[in-house]
Amino acid sequence: MSQSDPRRAIPRTDALLASPALVEAAARLGRDTVRAAVTGAQERARRGEIPPAEVEAAALAALPTRASSLTPVLNATGVVVHTNLGRAPLSAAALEAVLDAAGHVDVELDLTSGARGRRGAGMLAALRAAVPDAGGALVVNNGAAALVLATTALAAGREVVVSRGEMVEIGDGFRLPDLIASTGARLREVGTTNRTHLRDYADAIGPDTGCVLKVHPSNFRVEGFVSGVGLAELATLRRPDGSPVPVVADIGSGLLRPDPLLPDEPDATTTLRAGATVVTASGDKLLGGPQAGLVLGDADVVERLRRHPLARALRVDKLTVAALEATLRGPSTPVHDALHAPVDELRRRARRLADELGREVVPVEGRVGGGGAPGVPLPGWAVEVPVEAVSRLRQPTGDVPAVLARVDDGLGLVDVRCIPPDRDADLLRALREALAAPPA
Ligand SMILES: *Cc1c(COP(=O)(O)O)cnc(C)c1O
């Protein structure tokens, strides 16, 4: 390298790391991340791709915007509970509770006495208040964990009796038969794919029965010559010694009370009244809260689950405790608002965006999603965009949020249903950028 080689002018690593902008970045993103960006920029200068004077700016430009690689996305798919987008977005109340809980909190402490308190007592009280028919409540990591805990505690080494019509795969690798097998319980299938009768269950019940499991086949519907057995009938089943058989009902979606918009979607209150011993459900589907698995029902059975050693391995962290209680006690959730958004309001919002952009609006059908209510279309409105804009919306270059739109029949569709109305201005900026870009 000669004396006049411009590469000699490349700033040294420690000098760069001491620059105010990079010190600030290191405080936000971590020193290793910043050092990697600096090294990368120095490399580019050595290769002659950038002048030495631009190394600092190049390092800054190469830094990620946030410490986590998760990128916030505006959900313009019209799918309310979108599993790939993290299911339910939290309400403002839940978000605030999560921020409070991120520091030290009294999650297992009684501040009055200074003694140890019951973990998540406020959250469990909120759950019991929301479902007064449940004598007991327990919260674990997710719906699958709730089911694993229930079948392990009630039937490990024994039999779980399930209708063949309910041997479902929910998605996300959730296959009921595999899940039950993993608990050490034996699956006892009864009936046929389309029809199961009470006598099928009765014939299968014996001294070795741990529980009966009723699963809501949430992501498909069987029509035609179909019959199943209701919970009221299942609740009458007895072992040969006359003891009742616990009936576990996996309702999935986490509705706590009926929703007139979703008449076929089971809810915890109705399911318990119908005779289920315990109900299991997810926290981040229609309940609109954090990922969690709810167990609600008979106080003794819930207590048995709570005392099982596995419960400790499935317990939720303080952020979930905080978010779930705030979801239960707080105002209406984003999931509820998106589901129940008045169609006129959706049209008005889509129209306003389309007018700003010189585009057209189209009527669309949204979906509940998350494997719930497959037969329920949600009429709404979308802004129509060229298909090429859809991938640009996902990967914005400017200071605009990423947007997940959908493609239907050759049209790019930006459905406003799941975008909070106070984000319409951000959505407009993202659309402007995506539509302004030259065709790819
Ligand atoms: C979604 C669902 C599950 C799985 O719940 P996770 O919270 O995803 O673990 C189980 N059963 C039913 C019926 C479901 O809909």
Image (cartoon, rainbow, N blue to C red):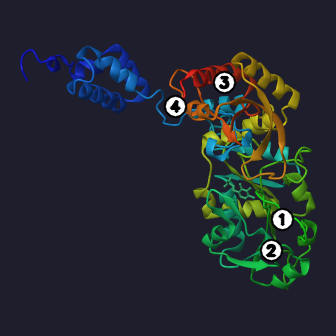
Q: Name the residue under label 1.
A: 222
Residue positioned 64% across, 24% down in the render: 431
- What is the CA distance from the residue labelled 2 to the residue labelled 3? 45 Å
Disc 2 to disc 1: CB gap under 8 Å: yes
Front-most of 180 and 307? Answer: 180
Q: How far apart are marks 3 and 4 (CA)?
A: 21 Å
* Comparing labels 2 and 4, the label whose residue is closer to the camera: 4
Give the secondary structure at mark 1: loop
Give SS at disc 3. helix
Q: Which residue was labeled with disc 3?
A: 427
In the rendered structure, find residue 193 and report the number of the disc placed on it: 2
Q: Tell me whether the residue at label 4 lies in contact with that at label 1, contact meaning CB atoms closer than 8 angstroms.
A: no
Dot 2 lies on which element? loop
Q: In this view, does 346 lie above or below 154?
A: above
Structural distance between the alpha carbons of marks 2 and 4: 49 Å
Mark 1 packing: few (<14 Cα in 10 Å), some, or many (20+)? Answer: few
Determine crowd level at label 2: few under 14, some 14-19, many 20+ residues with C-alpha closer than 10 A: some
Tag 3: residue type?
Answer: Leu
Quick one: label 2 or label 3, which is nearer the N terminus? 2
